[in-house]
Amino acid sequence: MTEFSVLGEHTQWQRDFELRSAASYTAAGLGAAAVERVLEGVRRDLGSWTVAGITDAGTRVGYVAVVVTDDDNGRAGRIGDLRVDPPHAGRGHEQAARAWAEGWCAERGARRVDVRLTEPAGELFDAYGVRGQLRARHVGSPPEPVGGVTARPMTAAEYPGWVTSEKAAYVDDIVRAGALSPKDAARKSDDDFAKLIPEGLATPDNTFLVLEVAGEPIGTGWLKHGHLPGATYGYSLHIHEKHRGNGYGRAAMAAGEQATLAGGDSVLMFTVWGGNEVAMNLYTGAGYQVVEESRSLDLPRPAA
């Protein structure tokens, strides 16, 4: 029988959790300095997590960590970790731990529960909708231009129209992923852009591109260098709608990889929102591994 006991001291679990997390981030192509930066952010949150030992007939078989916080949509729970040791896996402990975590969050007023996965979870979280994925790829050498696509710096005249379009697209992504209402998504978009590029085109360590074919603009790009040590974050690589279906998506990725190397980094990272299967397939085909996957489930869980 699977049982749970909340731990008053969980140093052993934290050490194991950090080692597992570091291994997953390293496997996705991040360097040691970038992995440590990610773990620094994780450690800041760990003090608020409740960690329970999973036991079977008095034997410790794993851990589950949970927390409930407030966000724009009310109370939200999170399963920070759910680990069953390999010798005890596949015996129903994982499902019991998931149910315990969901119940723990619901008892504290959570209207949904989130989970962030850094390694495949099999069918355990299939009922949780995918909110987004963080993808990454190590860029070892400058890629060759694809399909005659070239990239040039965005001009001051092009910037206002671009930023308006990007903010609207960001709102659409958030709403499609089911993360926020349109009103809350619009507010988040305004706030995030104000923080990320307060000086517009002059914001340091940002590259803004216009993608062209034979002198005709077909898309745009926005990348932040040094997002993590050695890693550029691609906020956007966008092909205009009328030019889609011509294979330019991979060309845009190549332009982003060129800009990553020019910015002094060797890893390019992107977030793809849930529901955007086209982008997920593009990143998979281009060799971008899943670093993290965010999923969520509304509470109470629908009856089976």
Image: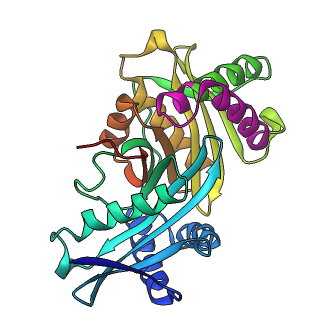
Res. 277 visible in picture: yes
Residue 190, relative to residue 264: is it above or below? Answer: above
Span shown in magenta: 172-197
Q: Quadrant of the C terminus?
A: top left
Q: Residue furthest top?
A: 242
Residue 268, percent from left and from top? 51, 49
Q: Is residue 203 left or right of residue 228?
A: right
Residue 6, relative to residue 291: is it above or below? Answer: below
Residue depicted at 51% across the width and 88% down the height: 11
Q: Residue 121 lies in magenta, yes or no?
A: no
Residue depicted at 82% across the width and 39% down the height: 198
Q: Number of callouts in the render?
A: 0
Q: Is residue 174 left or right of residue 205?
A: left
In front here: 225 or 67?
67
In front here: 279 or 214?
279
Q: Is residue 100 left or right of residue 199?
A: left
Occupied quadrant, residue 81: bottom left
Residue 122, percent from left and from top? 23, 56
